Amino acid sequence: MAACLFNITWLLSAVRQDFVCMNWQPTTDHSQRMARAQLMRSIREFFYQRDVLEVETPLLSRGTVTDLHLSAFTCEFNFDDSGQSLPLYLQTSPEYAMKRLLCAQSGPIYQLCKAFRHESAGRWHNPEFTMLEWYRPGFDHGRLMHEVDELLQETLHTAPADRLAYQQAMQTYAGLDPLTASHTALVDKLPILNINIDNASELSYDSLLQLIFSTVVEPAIGQDKPCFIYSFPASQAALARINTTDPKVADRFEVYFKGAELANGFFELASPHEQRERFKQDNALRSEAGYPQAPVDEHLLSALEAGLPDCAGVALGVDRLLMLKTGASHIRQVLNFGIDRA
């Protein structure tokens, strides 16, 4: 019996080894690699023509995002000057470091870099991915939407994009007002929209809104040309300012095209006090959900104390952009080596 178990164990090990050996190859072909190189050149030329400076910031940070819906990879730095092991976080976005540059009067800047999010891989997401992020001092989110639209027209040859307020989109496609509907009304709306989940009443208000938006609204918009959704509920402001005219909404936008959420942009919050409070609120939500506390980025808060110029910023997924450009149906088709072959 022992010999039999040994043979089975050896056989399974050999099968696994053969599987690994067979999967050394990239999942792209050379035309995809050429297309990526061309796209990166086009992006850099776009910003060169507009006098926006390319910058680099660290991939590792002592602080990380507090957002309930984002999870960062962690690692240990064993050679810190303190003599103690120091936890470091792979960036989910270069946002905090780029804002520190803006506070140091960098002017308009952009970055093409790797970002990392500790989430499962899928059609549109790989835990390690390429991000384009840029910031425009003197712009608000409306003006930045126009520039994002220009980039999409340049790289994807799209028609000028549609624009819809979040409230208008939800009223049109889901038949509800997201700024006034009660929690009970949202729960009661789910079966009418053919959304059937257990324990729906236990979801938060914003989770219900996000469920309805992703299930009903997203498939209905941005099919023939990109669609900007703007003026998200203030409770979903993230790092955007609250609108000064209508405090129920935030100066935030997202861009959708052919089923992909391509970009997320803000008229950037500049108040260090409000930013610290939002970090605290995020961590309170993380505690309620049973998640570990995320260390606040004190470098960012100190930079905001020095003064962030009025600016708008946006993060755009380059791999998703390349998928749309080449007609790829899965992100692995535009990555040389996805997480399953890393």
Image (spheres, rainbow, N blue to C red):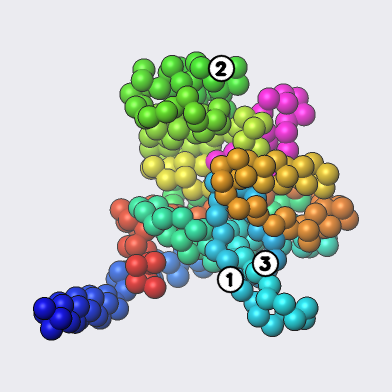
Cα separation, mark 1 vs mark 3, equals 10 Å
Q: Main secondary structure of the magenta part?
A: loop
What segment carries the magenta color?
239-254
Circle 1 SS class: strand
> Residue 61's mark?
3
> Residue 182's mark?
2
Cα separation, mark 2 vs mark 1, equals 42 Å
Instruction: Say whether residue 213 is magenta.
Output: no
Say whether residue 302 is visible.
Answer: yes
Circle 3 SS class: strand
Q: Nearer the viewer, mark 2 or mark 1?
A: 1
The outermost residue toward the front is 1
Residue plotted at (43% across, 67% down): 36
- If you read the primary sequence from the N terminus, does the residue marked by circle 3 or circle 2 appear first? 3
Name the amino acid type tagged 2: Ser
Q: Nearer the viewer, residue 328 or 19?
A: 19
> Residue 75's mark?
1
Name the amino acid type tagged 3: Ser
Mark 3 surroundings: few (<14), some (14-19) or many (≥20) residues within 10 A: some
Residue plotted at (36% across, 27% down): 195
Query: Which quadrant: the N terminus?
Result: bottom left
Q: Nearer the viewer, residue 298 or 239?
A: 298
